[in-house]
Each structure stands twice: as structure tokens, then as C-alpha cells.
Amino acid sequence: MSDKITTFKLKHLKEAGQKISVLTAYDHAFARLLDEAGIDILLVGDSLGMVALGHETTLPVTMEMMLHHTAAVARAARRALVVADMPFLSYQVSIEEAVRNAGRFLQEAGAKAVKLEGGQAIASTVRRLTELGIPVMGHLGFTPQSVHRIGGHRVQGRSEEAARRMIEDARALEAAGAFAIVLELVPKELSALITESVSVPTIGIGAGPACDGQVLVIYDILGLFERPLKHSKTYAPVGAMIREAARAFREEIASGAFPSDENSFSMEEETLLRLKDNRVQGSGDRV
Ligand code: KIV
């Protein structure tokens, strides 16, 4: 049997109690390394707009940006399932537009699935996409495309009413055919309840250990921003290493230590002599 991760396999992993690992990826080089490391899902998140493109929110991210980065990631993935985030306004206006845009991720960029933010409000869109063969991952809790309505990066579902609504949203996504549901910034007790209430895997980010899998932003686990995030963890201080490498490079350029003879190419001595002779003759002619 192929080792490739499919949406079908993910459900089996949940049933077998095996946890699912998900990292965001935005380019080919990172995607290749994460795939080789055995990460199950590479999520081309629209967090791209913030961490790779420097925007304040995910709202300025466009279809063209997402297609461009998804294609780079998909070309690297051998085993991992590549999921592309549908950007703001690419699926909310009408089901027809959602189908057309979601289809582009599979047809043009090589993604195997798309991710949409929202619950009952987008359930009919999720149903249509899955009916047409486009696998959908849901996203509940803190949904970054609604940051202005929510009023910041806040934990969601703390009140009984909000928690009940989120459980209903998760059930609606499952009934509509979603193959997995991201839970972002959700109290760990509520994530546990949702994880028990649905048969599809839940993937947490700031949602505690009970979820069937976990997702983090790759630049955060590498400490590229060195920002304190309660829900994340720095697995390797690569940010500090990059700054140190750049500083060492700058110093070696300034001192002339790089490039050395070892890093340089040479040519036949006779060719060089002829070139030098010509140059002397040439300059003589000009004089
Ligand atoms: O855009 C993103 O990276 C995400 C994950 C953090 C879940 O949606």
C-alpha cells in the first residue's frame, strides 16, 4: 500500500488513535524538508500573508498569491497531503465562485484539498464542493479572516452558548462532508468534546492535547519571529542562527576572508597569458 497520506487515511488514523502532524508550508524548499520529515499534512495557510508577505492580517491574500505558493509546495510533496487555504472572499460570495476557485487549487496548483473558515454558515458550500470531488477541511474557533468582527486574536467558545454553537458548527461541517476540522484558540475541554462528537479528525492550534492532530506555523516552530505565543513552541532557534550566519557573511565580505581560493574557479594559465598579452597590445593600440 502506498505511504501517501489521503483524506481517507486520516479518518483511519483518528480511529486508530494515531495523532496527525500538520505544519504550514509556503515554498518548495521548506515543503521538501517537511515532507521528508514525515509531516502528514502541508497546509498552505493564508497566514502566508502575515508571516511571509508582511501583512497585518490574512485579509489582503488573493487567489493568485495562494495558487502561486500552493503550486511550489505541491511540487515538493511526495507523501504529505497538500491542503490550500481558500483566501478571504474566494468562497463566501456564492457557491459557484467557491467551486470555481476551489477547483483551481486542484487543477492548477496540485493541491489535494482546500480549507475554508466557518461552520453552519458555509455548510452548503462545503457540501457542494465535496459532492463535486473537492475535499474540504473546516476551520472553527478563532477564524483569522473574521479578525475584525472578533476584535483580535481571542480564544473562542468560552461561554456555554458559544461552545454549543461551535459543537453544532463542527457537526454541520462533518454532515456536509468535511474530512477534518481545524480548531484554533479553543479551550482544551471544548476541543475534547468536539473531538468526541465528530468522526472526522480535529486538528488543533491552541486547542489543547485532545485533538486528533496538531498544526503550527512553520516559522513559529523555527523561531523566525521570536514572538511569544502561548500556543506554539520553538523546536529549533533557526531565526537566531540565520541572523548569526548573515552577520558572519557580512564580516567575511568586509575582511576579504570570503571568497577564498577554495570558493573560486580558475582558468588555463596559457589562456590567461594570451588574454593579458592582448590587453597590453589593445591598450597600446588605443594609445
Ligand atoms: O493560515 C494558517 O496558517 C492556518 C493555520 C494556522 C490553521 O489557518
Image: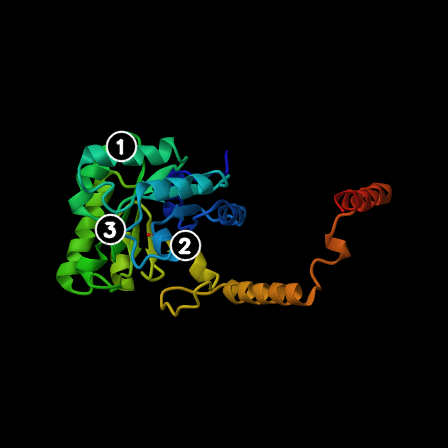
Question: Residue 50 location in percent, x, y?
Answer: 35, 56
For label 3, the residue is 197
Tell us which disc is closer to us: 2 or 3: 2
- Left or right: 238 as drawn, with respect to 278: left
The residue at the point 25 percent across, 58 percent down is: 142
Tell us which disc is closer to us: 1 or 3: 1
Mark earlier in primary sequence (1, 3)? 1
**Quarter holding residue 57:** bottom left
- 227 vs 246, nearest the viewer: 246
Q: CA distance from mark 2 to mark 1?
A: 26 Å
The residue at the point 24 percent across, 60 percent down is: 190
Q: How dense is the environment of label 2, judged by Cα within 10 Å: few (below 14), some, or many (20 and up)?
A: few
- Mark number displayed over residue 144: none
Whether the residue carrying mark 1 lies under 8 Å from ligand 1 is answered with no
The residue at the point 27 percent across, 41 percent down is: 178
Specify whether residue 236 is in view. Answer: no
For label 1, the residue is 100
Specify whether residue 200 is in view. Answer: yes
Q: How is the image coloured?
A: rainbow
Whether the residue carrying mark 2 lies under 8 Å from ligand 1 is answered with no
Question: Residue 284 location in percent, x, y?
Answer: 80, 45
As helix, strand or loop, the secondary structure at mark 2 comes to loop
- Mark number displayed over residue 52: 2
- 86 vs 276, nearest the viewer: 276
Q: CA distance from mark 2 to mark 3?
A: 35 Å
Question: Residue 277 location in percent, x, y?
Answer: 84, 44
